[in-house]
Image: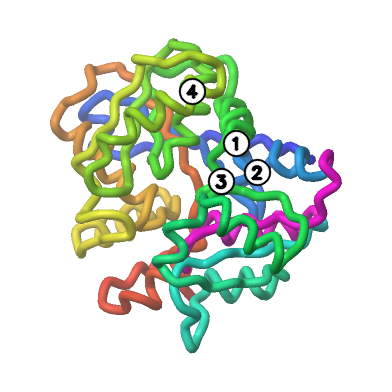
């Protein structure tokens, strides 16, 4: 698979200058048009493994607005795999932008009830999928597995001249990969996108232990910036995202990166970081969600990427 080097963009504004904190952004969102962000790293070695096993079909799982569903469809088209998406919930009368994209890129969408979806890891459910679709390479929901962690352990540039690495957190796979790459060095701040994210400590520790029999203590989860839960947002967050774009401009999605940067700026305002601290913030992509968010919540309009 081809490799691309993401750019690093340094932010410059009065708030950061006053706090004397240097913030640089690793722009994973700029890597590829449709397969960008952390998803490329998560899929990279999985696609190689699927090819090595002689599998021509990728099957995975997600909700109706899933970045992972979107990325898997893009990867299938880019690398000549058939793709199947098992989507949580009933098929809507009109597909949202995420699912329209996936279907346009050749993904076969299969909708299952939420009750059935909860049993997706069972042997019976897997057997039913095999009977219906034949042989496939299975990717977990969100794309997090050992091969995804291997890919995410290659995200950070070297040499790494920063004091803190900051990232949003969903399933914990990306953060686990960063911890593996850092091998106990530097400090890592993770900003969970969902409410009650403290359970992710156990998830992340289990992921790294399964990968290399190591757990790490050089990270902290900042759980105060979920804005009500996964995919939830309010006017304050939307205003921040739009103002941030107008200032820099770097587009932020409202599910992951908007919350990450809002939380980070709030910590800087609270003087959480000492003067002279150097931060590297990972923009994990997910910008495809902006169009869907605007469609779902027209009263909370994100102006970026529109028009």
Q: Are marks 4 and 1 in contact (CB under 8 Å)?
A: no
Please provide the residue range marked out in magenta.
Answer: 52-79
- Using the image as rendered, state which of residue 139 and residue 179 is in the foreground: 139
Crowdedness near tag 3: few (<14), some (14–19) or many (≥20) residues, C-alpha within 10 Å: many
Disc 3 + disc 1, Cβ < 8 Å:
yes
Q: Residue at x 79, y 40 (%)?
A: 1
Cβ–Cβ below 8 Å for labels 1 and 2? yes
Label 2 close to label 4 by CB (< 8 Å): no
Q: How is the image coloured?
A: rainbow
Image-quadrant location for residue 158:
top right
Q: Return the residue nearer the eye: 162 or 68.
A: 68
The location of residue 69, given as percent across then percent down, is 57, 60
Residue situated in front as seen by the camera: 219 or 22: 219
Residue farthest along the left direction in this orientation:
270
**For numbered disc 1, what is the local secondary structure?**
helix
Determine which residue is flagged by label 4. 208
Above or below, 223 relative to 226 = above
Name the residue tied to disc 3.
143
Please name the residue that numbered disc 1 is placed on: 148
**Element assignment for label 2:** helix
Which residue is at a point 82% across and 57% down the rendered structure image?
A: 80
Mark 4 closeness class: few <14, some 14–19, many ≥20 residues within 10 Å = many
Q: Residue 5 at what x, y percent from top left? A: 66, 35
Residue at the spot of label 2: 43
**26 inside magenta stretch:** no
């Amino acid at each position: 698979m081809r490799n691309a080097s993401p750019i690093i963009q340094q932010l410059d504004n009065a708030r950061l200058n006053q706090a004397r904190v240097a913030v640089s952004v690793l722009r994973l969102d700029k890597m590829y048009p449709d397969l960008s962000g952390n998803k490329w790293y998560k899929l990279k070695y999985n696609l190689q493994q699927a090819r090595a096993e002689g599998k021509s079909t990728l099957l995975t799982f997600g909700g109706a607005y899933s970045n992972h569903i979107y990325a898997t469809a893009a990867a299938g088209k880019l690398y000549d795999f058939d793709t199947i998406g098992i989507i949580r919930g009933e098929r809507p009368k009109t597909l949202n932008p995420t699912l329209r994209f996936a279907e346009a890129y050749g993904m076969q969408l299969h909708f299952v009830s939420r009750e059935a979806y909860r049993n997706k890891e069972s042997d019976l459910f897997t057997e039913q999928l095999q009977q219906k679709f034949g042989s496939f390479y299975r990717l977990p929901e969100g794309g997090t597995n050992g091969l995804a962690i291997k890919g995410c352990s290659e995200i950070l540039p070297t040499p790494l001249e920063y004091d803190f690495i900051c990232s949003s957190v969903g399933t914990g796979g990306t953060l686990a990969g960063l911890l593996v790459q850092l091998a106990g060095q530097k400090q890592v701040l993770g900003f969970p996108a969902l409410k009650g994210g403290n359970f992710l400590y156990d998830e992340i520790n289990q992921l790294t232990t399964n990968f290399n029999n190591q757990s790490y203590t050089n990270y902290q989860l900042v759980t105060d910036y979920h804005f009500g839960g996964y995919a939830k947002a309010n006017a304050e967050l939307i205003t921040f995202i739009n103002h941030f774009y107008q200032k820099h401009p770097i587009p932020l999605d409202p599910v992951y990166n908007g919350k990450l940067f809002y939380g980070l700026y709030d910590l800087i305002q609270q003087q959480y970081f000492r003067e002279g601290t150097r931060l590297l913030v990972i923009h994990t992509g997910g910008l495809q969600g902006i169009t869907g968010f605007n469609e779902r919540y027209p009263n909370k309009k994100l102006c970026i990427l529109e028009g």
